Image: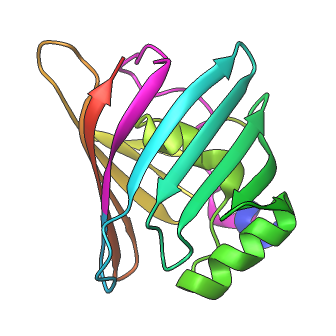
Amino acid sequence: MLAVILGVAGCQLTSRSTAIDSPTFVAGRLAITGFSLNPSFSLEQITSDQQRLTFSGAFGLGRVDMIFTRGQAVEGIVDGETLSEEALATKLYEATGLSLPLAGLPDWIMGRPFSGVPHQVIPNGFEQLDWRFQVIEDPVRGHPTKILAELGELGVVLGIRSWR
């Protein structure tokens, strides 16, 4: 943890300069460097403080549902099996080799840094936890249509087809 704190010295805790309204539903597809699968995803606001993030056809795991309450991953469901946040993170790591900050995924899918962890604003995006995000927005509606995320040699493209 100390390495993360030292590594992001001088970073900001403020939001992106472009305000993005929080949608009740976001859906699209992922393309990931080195993976032949392009899983679909959806992020749905269930209640005022609860969200469900779903990946279908993800990393050979079938359907993955993650429930978030007040910005924290509470549980995951992989092909009907309920997992704790830690077990889900472990399962995703075993399938992908990636250590993903689960609590940040909903915000990252909406093209914004997640709170509580420093980030650096860059032109058309931000950097957080060694990830670099370029956010391409619809010029009329002002919400993301594509998010390009990079971590070293790894590239992830989130194509957003629905934002409401």
- Figure label count: 0
Q: Residue at x 73, y 57 (%)?
A: 77
Which segment did they paint magenta?
A: 6-30
**Above or below, comparing residue 24 to residue 29 in the picture:** above
Q: Nearer the viewer, residue 147 or 31?
A: 31
Camera-side residue of 72 and 79: 79
Q: Main secondary structure of the magenta part?
A: loop
Eyeballing the image, is 145 above or below 163? below
User: Where is residue 17 drawn, in percent x and y?
Assistant: 39, 22
Above or below — where is 132 with respect to 87?
above
Percent position of residue 78, x then y: 68, 64
Percent of width and height locating residue 111: 40, 37
Q: Residue at x 32, y 86 (%)?
A: 34
Q: Residue at x 56, y 74 (%)?
A: 61
Image position of 66 with respect to 116: above or below: below
Which residue lies most toward the front here? 80
Image quarter of the C terminus: top left
Say how the picture is coloured: rainbow
Q: In percent of the image, x 62 and y 66: which residue is there?
A: 100
Tell me the quarter of the image containing the N terminus: bottom right
Residue 113: tell me if it is visible. no
Asked if residue 163 is among those painted magenta in the image, a careful observer would answer no
Give the image quarter of residue 146: top left
Q: Does residue 27 show up magenta in the picture?
A: yes
Residue occupying the far left of the picture: 139
Quadrant in which residue 90 is drawn: bottom right
Horizontal side, residue 42 vs residue 148: left or right: right
Residue 118 in the image, given as x and y percentages of width and height? 64, 45
Visible in this render: residue 89?
A: yes
